[in-house]
Image: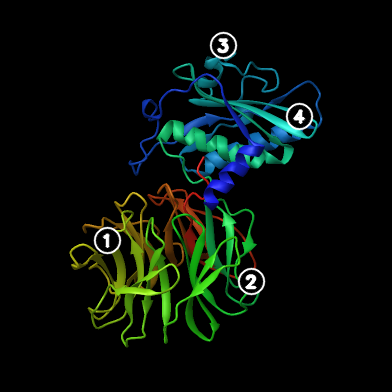
Amino acid sequence: MMIQHRLCAMLVVMVLMLLPQPAAAASYNYIDISNPFLRKTPIAVPTFQTDGQDSTAAPVARQASQLISYYLDFTGYFTISDPGAFLENPQTMNITGSGIRYRNWTAIGAELLVTGKVAVSDGDAEFELRLFDTVKEKMLLGKRYRGAIDDHQRVARRFCSEVVYTIFGSHGFFDSKLAFVSNGSGNKEIYLCDFDGRNITPFTHHRSISLFPDWSSDGSWIAYTTYAEKKPRIYIRHVREKRIAKIRKPKLQMTPAWVPGSFELAASLSFSGDQEIYLLTGNGKVIKRLTNMEGIDVEPTWSPDGKRMAFVSRRSGNPQIYIYDTVSGRVQRLTFEGRYNTQPSWSPSGDKIAYSAMRSGVLDIFAINPEGGEPTQLTENQGSNEAPTWSPDGSLIAFGSTREGKSRIYVMTAYGTDQRRLLTLPGEQTNPKWSPNILNP
């Protein structure tokens, strides 16, 4: 229900009009995102035009084009062409399909081109944006957005989502957020930020230690572990409303994980003695016990269909990752290399599990097929790297790293390329958790 409310609110400020119909997404598979050695597609994003000497529209146009360049570069799938190499003046060139001089863009290597025009009137702005294939000499996408002047960030995200959908058939991660832990205030609190590390806001104010945030499938709830009551307890809190639930079981409560598409979650509880994983309602009531073996079981993560759950267990003597099948009840060990494999995170497409593994005293991030096989190492020789979490489209992985000394949040592609820091805050940042796309385009 909350998602519907947010979508309606967005449509009030951004009226969408279709220009000539774009081609089907499947026809333009420029980038094979399943290829670990993918070639980035060069794309040019000239500064958008304005009417005449409109001093109000010019900065909005400049900011919108810069944001679109930044967001497309952030995906890891595009190379942004150098504006200094442009053969045309962005302010005088023809930006419509019939007037595009495609050879001027292929000559500088740009295979895609974004053009735009911004008009401002009485405090409102209109954005006219297009995407062209300069090789095939045709328009792929045309959109017109209307809203307030300061809506340029949302317009940029919405258009980039359409660009990614046109090329990949997926809307990407432009409407997602991250939760993470920071001790910059002197306590370990949970914070929220946009997918690109902007708009950081505190989520908890316990003045204690809060860890392991996890988003519900609709992005409305975050479950987390906190020591606000001295012992580790799981709180289940609504993201925007003052609603909160707690698990009424004694002893330790750790590492909650929401079941996909359900108001239920798994968590590690020790009220029966050994630390086992239980299935709980979204209100914190125990439904049933999922694991039952000597040796602590923690850190559950669900397959996208909710039929399998990976978790960490010491049942073999040291922490290894296992998979529990909810239908058959069968448990299989997944990791065998090394003596310390933890923090599993199941990819949105279901074909990989990222996790942290200690090799030679250093933590690095690996990915493995849920059916088993040879793991792929994604980080190496850059401090300790841990707590991987997938973007909602599975194209990026956020993680914590000490490569610059203090632990910070970084992001990389699903194949370990384009590793870069996501944000800078006082103190240390750990435990990132990526949300679903909270608002669907």
**Residue 184's disc number:** 2
Q: Is residue 157 visible?
A: yes
Q: What's the amino acid at mark 4?
A: Val
Q: Between disc 3 and disc 1, whose residue precedes?
A: 3
The residue under label 1 is which amino acid type?
A: Arg
Residue tagged 4: 120
Q: CA distance from mark 3 to mark 1?
A: 53 Å
Q: CA distance from mark 4 to mark 1?
A: 52 Å
Say which label, 3 or 4, has the lower sequence index. Answer: 3
Q: x, y percentage for residue 65?
A: 64, 34
* Amino acid type for the residue under numbered disc 3: Ser
In this view, 130 is above or below 289: above
The residue to which callout 3 is attached is: 98
C-alpha separation, residue under disc 2 versus residue under disc 3:
54 Å
Describe the element under mark 1 as helix, strand or loop: strand
- Estimate the spatial distance between the alpha carbons at disc 3 and disc 4, rounded to whole Å: 25 Å
* Circle nearer the N terminus (4, 1): 4
